[in-house]
Image (cartoon, coloured by chain):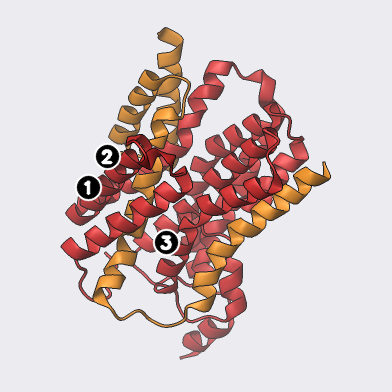
């Protein structure tokens, strides 16, 4: 009884620690990716402190890569904002998906933890078997947040020390991390595998097919995600509240 | 410089908005089995769509990207964790670009 009443008032440390543990691999995966970001941004002429500020305030991979690229290219504020927004619309789907899996909590807590929704923290939180509490989510996002910042700092100050070949090789790190997230899950579930294959095929078609290839990559991801998830829901409807 | 700073702030705002609105505003439990299933499959779909075909252009050479993809897929299949998969793929691409 005593323990139960404590749980309600205090931060749930066991949830927080579970989050921290699951966040460490994400943070380690982020370092090479944000390193690449820092490198590219500073090489393109963005000041070191601005590169770091972008990572601290945006905390997103694809969006800030594109945004920084446009800043370097001297694009208009409108174009920078619109492109970043379109790339990030996918977060609405993740945020909605997560809204169904969180424990009851006040609005301000939802607003705080929403900042830490990334492709990776979302994938780990939503593929987990338990409900997502505020404490768990805060634990989960702590290390990735600082890992993302640390990698950016290292990349931003190292720039010219790395050979061009090594810099180009690091471009694959972000995508390899995505692979590390969906392959183990698709191995265990045929439904997940089908959804991944459909999504990959659609986004490839949207990139290469005539006419369709005019759609920006941000919209392509959204269209492919919605169609692939719909097909998954039609072919493999889920049983009641089962998070496996 | 001011323009860059404004750009960064705008980027931060349009990154936060899609993250916060659905989770803050949508408080009901979705009852529809179809919609629940749809939301369940989103992480798989979004990760797949973000990875391919973008990964093919992620390095300076198409063939070295292919090698990187193979290495990442194999390491991920054996559940080696995010960091090992990421560094393994980078290393594979780098070795490829050194040799060929």
Residue furthest to the bottom = A1
The chain holding disc 3 is A
Q: Secondary structure at mark 1?
A: helix
Which residue is label 2 attached to?
B77
Q: CA distance from mark 1 to mark 2?
A: 7 Å
Among the chains pictured, the one given red colouring is A
Q: Residue at x 34, y 36 (%)?
A: A210
* Badge 1 and badge 2 in a common chain: no
Picture quadrant where residue B91 is located: top left
Give the residue displayed 34% in from the left and 34% down from the top.
Answer: A208
Q: Position of residue A125 (x, y in %)?
A: 42, 61
Quadrant in the rendering for residue B10 = bottom right
Q: Quadrant of residue A85?
A: bottom right
In the rendering, which numbered label is found on residue A187?
1
Q: Do discs 2 and 3 belong to a common subunit?
A: no
* Residue A148 locus on image (x, y percent): 59, 45
Report which colour depicts chain B.
Answer: orange
Image quadrant containing the N terminus of chain A: bottom left
Are labels 1 and 3 assigned to the same chain?
yes
Inter-mark Cα distance, 1 to 3: 18 Å
Disc 2: host chain: B
Q: Secondary structure at mark 2?
A: helix
Q: Would you name the residue on which mark 3 appears?
A: A125
Left or right, residue A30 beside residue A188? right
Does the rendering let one see residue A242? no
Asked if disc 1 and disc 2 are in contact, CB closer than 8 Å, the reply is: yes
B68 relative position to A73: left or right: left
């Amino acid at each position: 009884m005593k323990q139960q009443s404590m749980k309600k008032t205090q931060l749930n440390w066991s949830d927080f620690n579970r989050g921290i543990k699951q966040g460490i691999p994400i943070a380690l995966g982020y370092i090479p990716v944000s390193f690449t970001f820092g490198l590219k941004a500073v090489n393109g002429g963005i000041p070191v402190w601005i590169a770091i500020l972008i990572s601290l305030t945006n905390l997103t991979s694809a969006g800030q890569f594109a945004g920084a690229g446009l800043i370097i290219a001297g694009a208009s504020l409108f174009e920078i904002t619109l492109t970043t927004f379109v790339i990030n619309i996918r977060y609405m789907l993740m945020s909605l998906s997560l809204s169904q899996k969180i424990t009851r909590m006040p609005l301000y807590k939802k607003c705080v933890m929403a900042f830490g929704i990334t492709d990776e923290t979302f994938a780990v939180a939503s593929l987990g078997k338990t409900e997502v509490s505020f404490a768990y989510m805060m634990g989960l996002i702590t290390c990735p947040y600082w890992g993302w910042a640390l990698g950016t700092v290292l990349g931003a100050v190292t720039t010219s020390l790395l050979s061009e070949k090594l810099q180009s090789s690091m471009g694959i790190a972000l995508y390899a991390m995505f692979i590390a997230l969906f392959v183990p899950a698709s191995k265990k579930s045929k439904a997940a595998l089908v959804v991944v294959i459909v999504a990959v095929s659609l986004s490839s078609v949207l990139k290469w097919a005539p006419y369709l290839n005019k759609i920006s990559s941000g919209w392509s991801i959204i269209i492919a995600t919605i169609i692939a998830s719909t097909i998954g829901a039609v072919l493999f409807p889920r049983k009641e509240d089962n998070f496996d | 410089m001011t323009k860059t700073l404004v750009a960064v702030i705008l980027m931060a705002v349009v990154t936060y908005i899609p993250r916060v609105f659905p989770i803050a505003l949508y408080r009901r439990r979705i009852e529809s089995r179809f919609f629940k299933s749809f939301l369940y499959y989103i992480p798989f779909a979004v990760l797949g769509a973000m990875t391919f075909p973008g990964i093919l252009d992620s390095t300076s050479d198409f063939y070295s990207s292919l090698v990187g993809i193979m290495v990442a897929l194999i390491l991920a299949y054996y559940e080696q964790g995010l960091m090992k998969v990421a560094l393994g793929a980078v290393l594979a691409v780098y070795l490829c670009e050194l040799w060929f």
